[in-house]
Amino acid sequence: MTAPSPTVEPLTRAERLGPGARVAVVAPSGPVPEERLTAGLDILRGWGLEPVVAPHVLDAHPTLGHLAGADRARARDLTEAWCDPSVSAVLCARGGFGAQRMVDLVDWTAIRAAGPKAFVGYSDVTALHEAFAVRAGFATLHGPMVAAGTFLSDPRTQESLRATLFEPETVLTLGLETARALAPGRARGVTLGGCASLLASDLGTPHRRPSARGGLLLLEDVGEEPYRLDRVLTQLLRSGWLDGVAGIGLGSWEECGPYEEVRAVLADRFGGLGVPVVEEMGFGHSTTALTMPLGVPAALDADTGRLTLDAPALR
């Protein structure tokens, strides 16, 4: 019997950045502290980039304090930044919550017509990574946000993103020294993933990815106690979304409880899949957040704890 075809296929990669490139900063989710935004913009300028702040980045929703302005305004900022031919990349200012509320308000027809650009973010931005993959066919970058504390404070996080944007051929092998096998083996596939709870929340919504079959799934989360994390992963399992996944790379689980308890949940939920699983790879809500390309063919080696890309994240 022939095995089902993979549902996770390689996506169209954007071009790398060069000195003087204009990059737009958008806020698709939570409100952005102005002082942190200013500090992040200074780092980008130090790389020789010209950051442009979208009109509604510093907005505050009139009644919902967890949102950076109205849903339509945040969606319009993303659409207009992407469709501006002078903009080479779109970077998110922060995560939080809100991307799910605005994702269906983005003009995906216009996004597709404009073509691929580097898109960077993580956490709540997972909803947009999935949308870019499914609705536009574009590869994206699971990487630090411009106004996030890790980006502002950790040189390794900064260098991982800078190298990926400017010299992507220098960062083909990914994973911190802490990475090790939770389940042994090697696998090949196309990268996908992000925040586990956001992926579970995507189930049953329009335009969702049908499954992770044939993919190398990169997962992390924040603020989910072990029993809630168990619920999230069980939902992904029960829905069939993890059927046929080729391998799993795990990032950070900040504020999810003692790691030995989190690790027990991860081992229990993923152990029956029969695929390689690598833990503590160093991406997500951690003191160091490596930039991980999504939509790119790669190999995952649990013995070495490394993800090796077949091609650079950007052309």
Image (cartoon, rainbow, N blue to C red):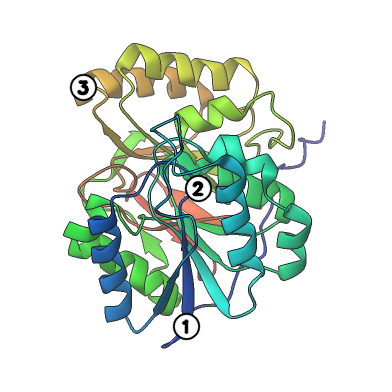
Residue 7: image x %, image y %? 72, 42
Crowdedness near tag 1: few (<14), some (14–19) or many (≥20) residues, C-alpha within 10 Å: some
Q: Quadrant of the N terminus?
A: top right
Mark 3 or mark 1, earlier in chain: 1
Q: In which quarter of the image is residue 77?
A: bottom right
The residue singled out by tag 3 in the image is 260
Q: Quadrant of residue 173?
A: bottom left
Q: Which amino acid does label 1 sit on?
A: Ala
Seen as rendered, the residue at the extreme front is 62
Mark 2 or mark 3, earlier in chain: 2
Residue 159: image x %, image y %? 27, 69
Element type where label 2 sits in the image? loop
Which of discs 2 and 3 lies nearer the camera? The answer is: 2
- Give how far apart the Cα atoms at labels 2 and 3 are: 34 Å
Seen as rendered, the residue at the extreme bottom is 19
Q: Which of 212 and 145 is in front in this view?
A: 145
